[in-house]
Image: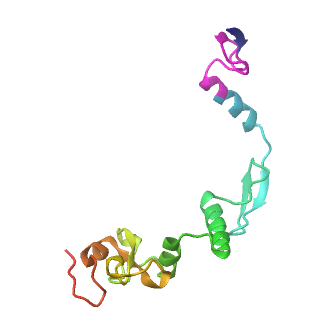
Amino acid sequence: MRMIRCLYCGETSTTRMKTKKFCDATCSNKYWYALTSNKPTYKRSCVYCKKEFETKKGNQVFCCGGHRKKHHLGRKILLGEVPKRWIVLNRDNFRCYYCGRSPKDGIVLHVDHIVPKSKGGSDDESNLRTACADCNVGKGNKYYGEKFTID
């Protein structure tokens, strides 16, 4: 055991850790917040939308996390690293093929097989389409041309 003096509050405590500098996590968080809150702000332009924003991180290039995700997803699409699910949903404009509803209407989207896998269908993009949960579950393992009812 060794004695330490907390860098934030100055209290002494004992610890087995050689690198411990604070009496608890609260003091550690307050100490690091105090250090970072005095940083200068930088004016940046978002790489995705070109909007001006201020940041305390010198290397930040996106105005929000959503733009960062969209930018990196776009790069993955170009490199061919995106899951088929995303490609099919994006190709179908995030709308159900059967009823035309979208997530704005409060539905959950699935990726549906045109020719069901149980009837020899493949996982190829040409055999996939977007369907809402109601239509996909109601269709079951039938072809699109076969009659099916939505409960």
Q: Nearer the viewer, residue 33 or 115?
A: 115
Q: Find residue 53 and report its horizontal and vertical position in percent.
A: 72, 58
Q: Quadrant of the C terminus?
A: bottom left
Q: Nearer the viewer, residue 16 or 66?
A: 16
Q: Magenta includes 10?
A: yes
Residue at (59% x, 61% y) in the render: 66
Q: Is residue 30 above or below residue 130?
A: above
Most distant residue in the bottom direction: 145
Q: Which residues are magenta?
A: 6-28
Q: Is residue 8 above or below residue 90?
A: above
Q: Find residue 111 and report its horizontal and vertical position in percent.
A: 41, 74
Q: Magenta includes 110?
A: no
Residue at (58% x, 70% y) in the render: 82
Residue at (54% x, 69% y) in the render: 83
Residue at (22% x, 87% y) in the render: 147
Report the colour scheme. rainbow
Q: Find residue 16 and report its horizontal and vertical position in percent.
A: 66, 14
Most distant residue in the front direction: 120
Q: Is residue 9 above or below residue 65?
A: above
Q: Is residue 57 above or below residue 144?
A: above
Chief SS of the magenta region? loop
Answer with the quarter of the image where residue 117 lies.
Answer: bottom left
